[in-house]
Image: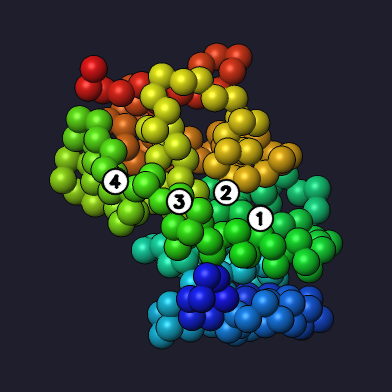
Amino acid sequence: MIGGSPPSRILVVEHDPTIAEVIVRYLERDGHRVEWVRDAATALGRAAAEPPDLVILDLGAPEPDVLAACRALREPPPGPMLMLTVSGEELDRAVAMEIGAEDYVSKPFSPRELALRVQALLRRSRGATVPAGTGGILRDGDLVVDVGARDVRLGGAAVTLTTREFDLLTHLMRNPRQAFSRAALLHQVWGWSFGDSSTVTVHVRRLREKIEKDPTAPRRIVTVWGVGYRYEPIEQ
């Protein structure tokens, strides 16, 4: 439970009952409502019936349609998604980010670390990490971001962003023309003191696909070679 709000509903998709039992126990201890299902197909039905606040999904589940189900769970995006990946499998981590997961934890994992990651994702998705007075409207030409409502419009049309994509965009827009390294963005946006910098690269690419006229020649989120990225306003 966060800040006196109702218990969060978390949907856990994990084929191994032993791992699922540990996850459920730790999350329920933190006051969450947790539902466990064994497969992604069942998860789709449960998510449609009662949209969860957060999904934890085992990317390594032994089922042929797990990736299709993952993508379906992101359209439209529910609450944030945290994926469980195999330790050391770079492909699993890359797939997790490509699909749109806000975070991932590698197996074997610390149940307490998983619970803390869940808390952080829920706080961010509810806007609890936005300090008072930092809401308002961010504008750059035809791109308009209502920070308080977590609403993004491009040319008047709604743009669907994941929690991380939204936080990354607002962070860059609040600091125009400032170059950030990938490590700095991991710390300032993700809250990670260490991690895989390719996470930032993938999220930048997804943002460009959604807000740039030509993602291959971005004008807003530009690459600073040897450093990282900066936001270059269209309107001077």
Give the alpha-carbon distance from disc 2 to disc 1, as whole Å.
8 Å
Q: Do the CB atoms of the residues marked 2 and 1 lie less than 8 Å apart?
A: yes
Mark 1 surroundings: few (<14), some (14-19) or many (≥20) residues within 10 A: many
Q: Which mark is residue 104?
A: 1
The residue that appears at 16% across and 45% down in the rendered structure is 156
The residue that appears at 25% across and 31% down in the rendered structure is 140
Q: Which mark is residue 136?
A: 4
Q: Vertically, is 14 above or below 88?
A: below
Q: Is tag 1's residue or tag 3's residue first in the polypeptide sequence? A: 1
Mark 2 surroundings: few (<14), some (14-19) or many (≥20) residues within 10 A: many
Q: Vertically, is 56 above or below 31?
A: above
Give the alpha-carbon distance from disc 4 to disc 1, as whole Å.
30 Å
Mark 3 surroundings: few (<14), some (14-19) or many (≥20) residues within 10 A: some
The residue under label 2 is which amino acid type? Answer: Met
Q: Is tag 3's residue or tag 4's residue first in the polypeptide sequence? A: 3
Q: Which mark is residue 130?
A: 3
Q: Is tag 4's residue or tag 1's residue first in the polypeptide sequence? A: 1
Residue at which label 2 appears: 97
- Quarter holding residue 119: bottom right
Eye-nearest disc, 2 or 3: 3
Relative horizontal placement of residue 233, taking residue 206 as reference (left or right): left
Give the alpha-carbon distance from disc 4 to disc 2, as whole Å.
29 Å
